[in-house]
Amino acid sequence: MSEIMRHLSKRSCIFAQAKKAKQRQRNNKKRIMSLRFTLRQNKIKSNKSFGKWYAHTLRGSEITLEDIARQVGYSCSVSKGDVYAVILAMDNVVSRALKKGHVINLGALGKFYLSIRGVCVDNPDAFSVKDHVKGVVCKYTPAGHRVQSLGGRISRPFTDDCVLEQVSVYDETGHLAKRVRRGGRVRTK
């Protein structure tokens, strides 16, 4: 009889853990965070958009590798240390592959690749790396897939249906006029 009770106790414990995990997932879905922005005026006189206003994204706090390892460890059966070790090893592999000119496709995360930032020349013979290459930058393209029902538009889960929140409005002199909380789903192009 005690064997049966022990089995039932283990089983109920497993069900309780599964129920808690589902509750956490539901709570995470309820907590939709918004991408916060404010309006700024372009103050660069040489720019063709001088004096015009644009949306400026407000960055949140930085999420560290340690934070990511901890969160991934909580959401699956892998330990935080294992996640951390894999990410550190991946860093070396990705870095070497990028420097060889490869595109790194991380599936649902997207693609990384290196690009050269430089200055245009009129004649290819006048081009020199020293004078015309300004640097190498790492570029990122979020994963996406083409949706025929949207006219062949590419849907990107990281950026589609982003909830935007304007946190301040400025008057024509550039001074803060009022604080607002307007949100709305924006389908990015």
Image (cartoon, helix red, strand yellow):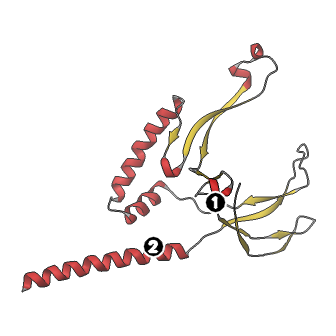
For label 1, the crowd category at 10 Å Cα-Cα, with few meaning under 14, some 14 to 19 and many 20 or more, is some
Please state which of the two labelled residues, at mark 1 or mark 2, is closer to the viewer.
Answer: 1
| Residue position marked by numbered label 1 in the rendering | 160
Gap in Å between the C-alphas at discs 1 and 2?
A: 21 Å
Quadrant of image for the C terminus: bottom right
**Left or right of 85, for residue 180:** right
Q: Position of residue 75 (x, y in %)?
A: 39, 65
Hey, what amino acid is under mark 1?
Asp
Q: Nearer the viewer, residue 173 or 52?
A: 52
Quadrant of image for the N terminus: bottom left
Element class at badge 2: helix
| Residue position marked by numbered label 2 in the rendering | 25
Q: Position of residue 30 (x, y in %)?
A: 54, 76
**Left or right of 132, for residue 9:** left
Which quadrant of the figure has residue 47? top right
Q: Residue at x 75, y 16 (%)?
A: 124
The extreme top residue here reads 125
The total number of labels drawn is 2
Q: Which disc number belongs to residue 101?
A: none
Hey, what amino acid is under mark 2?
Gln
Q: Position of residue 40 (x, y in %)?
A: 82, 60
Give whichever of discs 1 and 2 has the lower sequence position.
2
The extreme left residue here reads 1
Q: Nearer the viewer, residue 181 or 159?
A: 159
Q: Residue at x 80, y 16 (%)?
A: 123
Element class at badge 1: loop
Q: Residue at x 87, y 68 (%)?
A: 175
